[in-house]
Image (tube, rainbow, N blue to C red):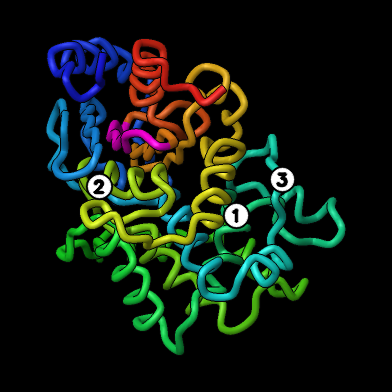
Amino acid sequence: MSICRDSEALNVMVKEALHFTKYGKVADYIPALSDANPETLSLAIYEGGSTCASAGDTQEMFTLQSISKVITLALALMDIGEEGVFAKVGKEPTGDPFNSIIKLETHSPSKPLNPMINAGALAVTNMIQGSTVDEKLGRLLSFIHELTGNTSIQYNEKIAQSEYDTAYLNRSLAYFLKQHDVVDGNIELLLELYTKQCAIEVSCDDLAKMAYVIANEGRHVSSERPIIPLHIARIIKTFMVTCGMYNASGEFAIKVGVPSKSGVSGGIMAAVPYGPGIGIYGPALDQKGNSIAGMKLLETLSQRYNLSIF
């Protein structure tokens, strides 16, 4: 049965997964994120043309947070190539939390293990081409506009400022990286760009469309023309499988088996290879920073529609 022709079942699955929100809590280490309603859960599925199925309030806006790491990685790879990116960032998963510094201190050379942890994402953001924060952010937003077909997407200034004001650990990571020549330039400008990047605001529909492009060889959501080169789309899907769900990625691969990336706002972007793009929003998080109801919903979807790539 096609996932897009099963709207009644999708509504039931969302309602059932909603029960799990009581076991999670919204992120509060970024003060502005603590305003989210923990009992929210929404789902959008995109297969080209228009959003083919949805459940919940799919137009509710939320920030990308760590989901942005996938998009900046694609842009950096297109800007400077694989050799340039992976000279500064590794390709291996880590069992540590996304904001841990321990591997930087205990590994030689002291470069981040992968682009999906905060240290690696800071290094990748530092690679985006442009002479100012506004120019780099503008290029990133234009890329997202192209991926989604939605030119109204911007960043949330309140959340960006809240993140910047409380980015003590990310500052520590960035200065450590600078000490070891992984990043260069002004660290405060890097933090400004990174927090604005994380605060880019989207809906589930937008997320599903970005996932669709990644899932389908980097092709545009409507015209099918290539936006992301095929080899780069494959690289980022691989990172989504191995590192995309923080230090729950291994268990997620077994239970769901779909290239996915989560963010602490509660978003999850899932890209079924050569299939639909899925966008989920549920701000109640588990202890590892993933949407607790969103994870359950994806597990149910994967089992019902045989979505796992394994």
Q: Is residue 135 magenta?
A: no
Relative depth, front residue between 1 and 71: 1
Using the numbered discs, state the Cα–Cα distance from disc 1 to disc 3 in whole angstroms. 9 Å
Amino acid type indicated by mark 3: Glu
Mark closer to the chain start, 1 or 3: 3
- Tag 1: residue type? Pro
How many residues crowd around disc 2 within 10 Å: few (fewer than 14), some, or many (20 or more)? many
Q: Is residue 309 above or below residue 71?
A: above
Residue 307 at what x, y percent from top left?
A: 42, 22
Point out the frontmost of discs 1 and 2.
1
Give the residue drawn at x 41%, y 15%. 306
How crowded pointer 1 is (Cα within 10 Å; few <14, some 14-19, many 20+) is rated as many
User: Which of the two residues, 17 or 12, is positioned nearer the viewer here?
Assistant: 12
Q: CA distance from mark 3 to mark 2?
A: 29 Å
**First along the sequence among labels 3 and 2:** 2
Graded by Cα atoms within 10 Å as few (under 14), some (14 to 19) or many (20 or more), the crowding at tag 3 reads few
Residue at 45 percent across and 84 percent down: it is: 130
Q: On the image, numbered disc 2 is attached to which residue?
A: 62
**In the image, what residue occupies the spot 62% across and 58% down?**
120
Q: Determine the image quadrant of residue 295.
A: top left
Task: Identify residue for label 1.
Answer: 115
